[in-house]
Image: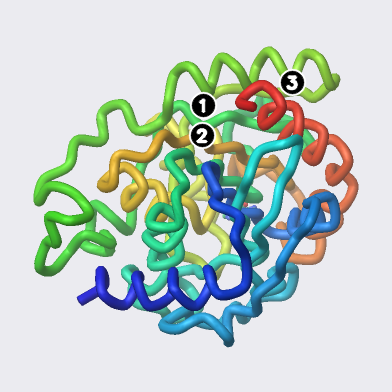
Amino acid sequence: MQYEQAMEAVAAIQAHTAVKPVVGIILGTGLGDLAAEIEQAVAIPYSEIPHFARSTVQGHAGRLLIGTLEGVPIVAMQGRFHLYEGYEVPVITFPVRVMHLLGANTLFVSNAAGGVNPAYRPGDFMVIRDHIAFAGLAGANPLVGPNDERFGPRFPALAHAYDAVLRTLSHTVAAQVGATLHEGIYAMVAGPSFETQAELRFLRIVGTDAVGMSTVPEVVVARHMGMRVLGISLITNMATGEESEEVNHEGVLATSDAARPRFAALVKGILHELA
Ligand code: HPA
């Protein structure tokens, strides 16, 4: 069923633009600003795309943007959907299906995350080498339910989910634009409450470098369809379990605001190299 629904969304989007995107970008919390840099951008509110959900979180606009960035035809989600908004997982990942059917073979996903690795600092970036899907391992996987072979296999492998070539490329570009880019493990939790101190210590012990409430479902669906994936987290706060001050959404937004120019430079530099 999702295939037919995705094709309906594709048809509605193609009625707005002739651009055939080759890269899909998901702009994370507060990073939606990059939208202003997209050339010949067509912006389509999610409410006008069949079967798309609505974005309910502050810092997430809720529009699909199609145009070119650094000469690369792209489709970008300005605002994404989260498990904590109460959406079923396939609803969260539906736009990734649509981006792929529009022509995107690469997914570039960004997010805001807490730095569990004590060497990280707010404002640093982390390219995702691998992930731990706490909700996914427990059943909140977007591929639960009947499998549609037109998208991909019943049991897709995820051992090499994050493309090694794209990771190397991101380090090269980060050095060029002067961004601090770590490489590490992203753990997805369901949220929306932030983690307890004991949970953060647990996450650290099992190998987490950064923790967040998104990204993993989209990556699973992208890999199911054979897309190449690059994931970059912006570290907005420390989350080692030893912080004296409690984390809050406003602080997360303030840090992502401040990092906006460097994030834009990083994304554009990577696209430039991809072109
Ligand atoms: N925990 C979970 N998600 C987050 C955090 C955090 O500390 N910061 C930004 N997103």
Whichever of callouts 3 and 1 sits on the residue coming sooner in the sequence is: 3
| Res 123 seen here | yes
User: Mark 2 — residue?
Assistant: 230
The 10 Å Cα crowd at callout 2, few under 14, some 14 to 19, many 20 or more, is: many
- Quarter of the figure that contains the C terminus: top right
Residue 92 position, x and y percent, is 42, 68
- Crowding near the residue tagged with mark 1, few <14, some 14–19, many ≥20 C-alpha atoms within 10 Å: some
Element type where label 1 sits in the image: strand
Of pointers 1 and 2, the one earlier in the residue sequence: 1
Measured as percent of width and height from the top left, residue 104 is found at 47, 46
* Residue type at tag 1: Gly
Where residue 45 appears, x then y in whole percent?
65, 79
Tell me whether the residue at label 1 lies in contact with that at label 2, contact meaning CB atoms closer than 8 angstroms. no
Q: How far is the residue under mark 3 from the one under mark 2?
A: 14 Å
Question: Closer to us: mark 1 or mark 2?
Answer: 2
Q: In the shown orientation, is residue 73 left or right of residue 121? A: left
Mark-to-mark CA distance, 3 and 1: 15 Å
| 90 to 135, vertically: above or below | below
Q: Please tell me whether mark 2 sits on a helix, a strand or a loop.
A: strand
**Residue drawn at 51 percent across, 34 percent down:** 230
Looking at numbered disc 3 in the image, what kind of residue is underneath it? Ala
The answer to whether the residue bearing label 1 lies less than 8 angstroms from the nearest atom of ligand 1 is no
Residue plotted at (10% across, 68% down): 146
The residue carrying mark 3 is 174
Residue 273 versus residue 113 in the image, above or below: above
Residue 199 vertical position relative to residue 115 in the rendered view, above or below = below
Q: Residue at x 62, y 48 (%)?
A: 74
Labelled disc at residue 184: 1
Identify which amino acid the numbered label 2 is placed on.
Answer: Leu
